[in-house]
Amino acid sequence: MQAIIAAFTPIWIIGALGWLAARFGVASGHVQRALTEFAFTIAMPAVLFTTLSRTPLGQIQPRPLLAFALSTFAVGLPALALIRGKLPDRVIGAMSSAYVNSGNLGIPVGLYVLHDATFVVSVMVFQILVVSPLIFLGLGAERSSLLAPLRTPIVAASILGLGMSALGLHLPDPVSGPLEILGGAAVPLALFSLGMSLKGSAIAWRATGPVVALKLLLQPLMAFLAGRLLHLDGPALFAAVLFAGLPTAQNTYVYAAEYGRPTELPRDAILLSTFLSMATLTLIALLGTG
């Protein structure tokens, strides 16, 4: 339990600071929008590029990743069909129910619980290069081509990073250093902006509850079933289920804000799933190591 709390503590503190800044007028809505845009267009691409460019492609674990991927689509596609509204809003709802926080939570959870963070690389590659382009396509469905997702900074930076890894290329320190500094701002900016959005807001339980239930209960169950169908057991099955049980990623809020969609559902899903997942992840960890 201590490991789970240690992974979540920075999220709550930075989010609370964002709420306090908005509550006492230290930062305005203009600041919030600027933080979100900077995170989406500069900081997130920087951290993804530097991370993936240094990641050996041999670390990708195909079978547990397939179980995780099947759980993503097993939850996300039905959510996309059932949620009401325009396609971009349904996409955000589906993302809230099936897109996990693989970065700032996946890495510490992998280290503390699995004692190995290599599986998080597989999850990050899948979400960024498979799921994110589909999300961007749906978010821009009214005004984009099929190639438009490849031109978004996040996907383009990820492709470049993996390309450098595959070719065995490395940036010189004078170039990689500034990129690391920019990338280090991605998570705190997204969390601070998310915290600011909570000012004066109450959770819409009727809309958020089912989404969070899909995320924290159904997705890990689907990962377990998919893993058993793929004859996974032991650490491989545990990794797939544990990562499927991670809460909704803060990217969901950033994507919605960047594309001008309502942010209440992703904001509430992130808040509620992050809080409740401390209990559900602990339960998964106890079952997986028991």
Image (spheres, rainbow, N blue to C red):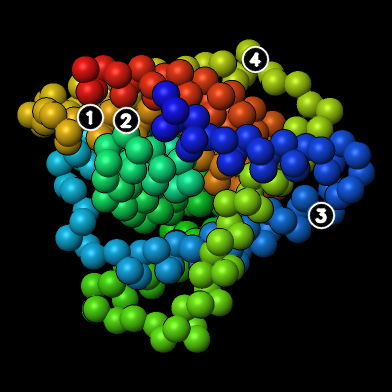
Foreground mark, 3 or 2? 2
Labels 3 and 1: the sequence-earlier one: 3
Q: CA distance from mark 1 to mark 2?
A: 6 Å
**Residue on which disc 4 sits:** 205
Confirm or deny contact between disc 4 and disc 1 (CB under 8 A).
no
Give the farthest residue toward the front: 2
Which of pointers 2 and 4 lies earlier in the amino acid sequence? 4
Assign the N terminus to one quadrant of the image: top left
Tell me how far mark 3 sits from mark 2, CA to CA: 35 Å
Q: Position of residue 102 (x, y in %)?
A: 41, 44
Q: Earlier in the sequence, mark 4 or mark 1?
A: 4
- The local crowd at label 1, few if under 14, some if 14 to 19, many if 20 or more residues have their Cα within 10 Å, is many
Above or below, 46 against 40 in this view is below
SS of the residue under disc 1: helix
Q: Identify which amino acid the numbered label 4 is placed on.
A: Trp
Q: Secondary structure at mark 3?
A: helix
Task: Report the residue at 48% width, 46% height from top.
Answer: 104
Which dot, 2 or 4, sits closer to the camera? 2
Query: Relative to the observer, which residue lies in front, 185 or 158?
Result: 185
Q: Nearer the viewer, residue 181 or 233?
A: 181
- Circle 4 Cα neighbour tier, 10 Å, few/some/many (<14 / 14–19 / ≥20): some
Query: Which residue is tagged 3?
Result: 31
Q: CA distance from mark 4 to mark 1?
A: 30 Å
Which residue is identified by label 2? Answer: 242
The secondary structure type at the circle numbered 4 is helix
Separation of marks 2 and 4 at Cα, in angstroms: 25 Å
Where residue 181 appears, x then y in whole percent? 57, 69
